[in-house]
Image: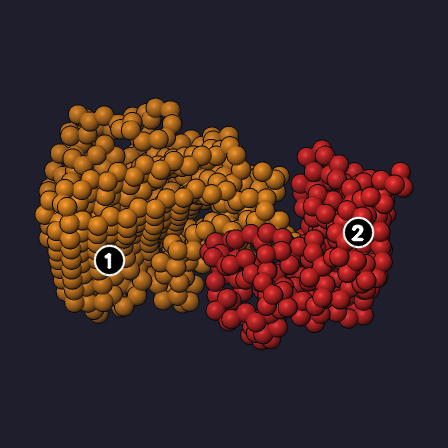
Chain colours: A red, B orange
Amino acid sequence: MLEIKDLYAGIDGKEILKGLTLHVGAGEVHAIMGPNGSGKSTLANVLAGRPKYVPTSGSVTYEGKDLLALPAEERAREGVFLAMQYPVEIPGVNNIYFLKAALNAVRKHQGQEELDAMEFLQLAREKMKLVELDEAFMNRSVNEGFSGGEKKRNEIFQMAVLDPKLAILDETDSGLDIDALRIVAEGVNALRSEKHAVLVITHYQRLLKYLVPDFVHVLADGRIVKSGGKELAEELEQKGYEWIEEELVAAR
Amino acid sequence: MSSTIEQIASQEYKYGFITDIEADQAPPGLNEDIIRLISAKKNEPEWMLEFRLKAFRHWLTMKEPTWANIKYGPIDYQATSYYSAPKQKKKLNSLDEVDPELRATFAKLGISLEEQKRLSGVAVDAVFDSVSVATTFRTELAKVGVIFCSFSDAVQNHPELVQKYLGSVVPYTDNFFATLNSAVFTDGSFCYIPKGVRCPMELSTYFRINSANTGQFERTLIVADEGATVSYLEGCTAPMRDENQLHAAVVELVALDNASIKYSTVQNWYPGDKEGRGGIYNFVTKRGKAFKNAKLSWTQVETGSAITWKYPSCILQGDNSIGEFYSVALTNHRQQADTGTKMIHLGKNTRSTIVSKGISAGRGQQTYRGEVKIMKSAEGARNYSQCDSLLLGDKCGAHTFPYIEVRNSTAKMEHEASTSKIGEDQLFYCQQRGISAEDAVSMIVNGFCREVFKELPMEFAVEATKLLGVSLEGAVG
């Protein structure tokens, strides 16, 4: 589904990703872990097409398409979803209106019929239960006055409604209490299927207790330096990231 | 700022077309003869001519104000023609008799009279240049005693009402532009709602400037007698022109005891091209007087004109009277707007609310200028003011000048102000969910304006959203 080859990318002229290669197949959940500054968020934002993050070389193929050639909204409509680390507030724009506009933009692009207000409400109500959000959230402005945990749950709610093929979670677990963490993980687990792939970007192992990945990759200095199964996450939890860095230094 | 916003912000005015109707036009220039000509053309009574002449003589002693935060070249008042009326062969009895070309123009604007009539139940008094050509629903309104007609008709048919209230809120000496208007106004609308009557429909006037080089001087007078209620809608577009067109309107509202007037405006006159050439100069004086327990509410959506100079105000004279001002103003390209309101509290327990939303794009410059005056007599007065500015891009500007004068220590005042920018982050967030940049901008801007739009009557809110969209981009979702 997603094929990243020797990707170099940076922000403000500073190179952050330095030859990253990663293969994500349909139905798989991958965790990307790594110390601060290793390039985790850069990877997420480059994949989603955030303008500040500029790829300089290498390639990203998504469903056979050159992902980097598509503008951000096209990527979204093709089924790439980024749950943001810092979801923004949009005052005065109704949460449910926003999501309906998004869903219908995606559906239209995919040749599906747009949902009318009633159909959409039904879908939204169903997905809302999944993330244990109160219906009152529907009529509030997008993320305005939401707590940190509510914003993250809203991201997962949007993900559940949009049903993306490739979901990227950029440190969705940061700042969440244990209940919210469980809710987020359940939301992602509900999305798991043969057709979906998930890329979980995290600093800590704790989310991975609820959301068990098929593969774990360690990102350091802009490259994937170690890959393994879920046990690698546990090892990282016990030993920290230092041993990997030491291994790297030794290898040079 | 991203190129998308610049692209969207640089789209051209869509309603630029000129209707080819022969105008009956006075030669350029302003003197007592021209004023006598206007008065004679309109077959006015002596007192009306006297009012005009007094105003003109006073105007000669006045200087154009320069305190506003707007820049424009000198206006040659002698180069403007002060009278222009579309030629009509005979008096019209129904809409069917309206000049087909005129009706086509309205159709282009999407405000076909029949549709207005049929779909929304709104009575439309269409002002084309300076003379009313069609008035609808007059009979139905007459059943409940509501008078809704052109100002000229009112001078002929209801002189006692006009004479009593004309200049009672905006005296002919008020300010340079209002005084000019008092001397040369050609037409406008007149409304009278009798005692205790709730006007059964929303009253609406579409204004349109057409002839080149013709200053447009509208005069509107709305009187709600004791306990009466009325909602009035004013909306306008203008065709594309190179010369600057001067517009100096006066609107007077009189809300007698327990009466309520809601006045809503959508203004989308030609703003000039990207370099600021052409466009309407809009110098408007709008003011209402509220008597005991009366309520005045101004709602405006200002997206057009090269220059906007406009401060719809409330004189809260009666005890417990209420004044409201809800405003969305948008400046794009090189548009300049200096707009706001005045709330003058005279009566006890008077209350006022100000919600102003300014949007600047391109090289637009925008100023909010508000004055809240609590006079000594205004025991227990309250005011709430909120001024928010939204910037699109980094070449535009927003300025806020709130003046507050309190002479009674029991007053309660609240003022909030904010300035924000549509950020890459907000745009990206929308795009990442599949929403196009253009839709995202309109969504964010409409969200910003929501508090004001919800004050507009339903059918007008749709119009307002549309006009905001036209000014910023192609379509609004």
Residue assigned mark 2: A218
| Residue B282 visible in the picture | no
Left or right of B402: which side holds B377? left
Crowding near pointer 1: few (<14 within 10 Å), some, many (20+)?
Answer: many
Q: Position of residue B34 (x, y in %)?
A: 23, 32
Amino acid carrying mark 2 in the image: Val
| Residue B264 visible in the picture | yes
Left or right of B403: which side holds B395? right
Quick check: marks 1 and 2 in contact, CB under 8 Å? no
User: Which of the chains bears the disc numbered 1?
Assistant: B
Q: Are marks 1 and 2 on the same chain?
A: no
- Location of the N terminus of chain A (image quadrant): bottom right
- Location of the C terminus of chain A (image quadrant): top right
Residue assigned mark 1: B261
Question: Is A96 above or below relative to A50?
Answer: below
Mark 1 element type: strand
- Residue at 77% from the left image edge and 71% from the top image edge: A193
Marks 1 and 2, how far apart at CA: 68 Å
Amino acid carrying mark 1 in the image: Ile
Q: How many marks?
A: 2
Q: Position of residue B137 (x, y in %)?
A: 30, 64
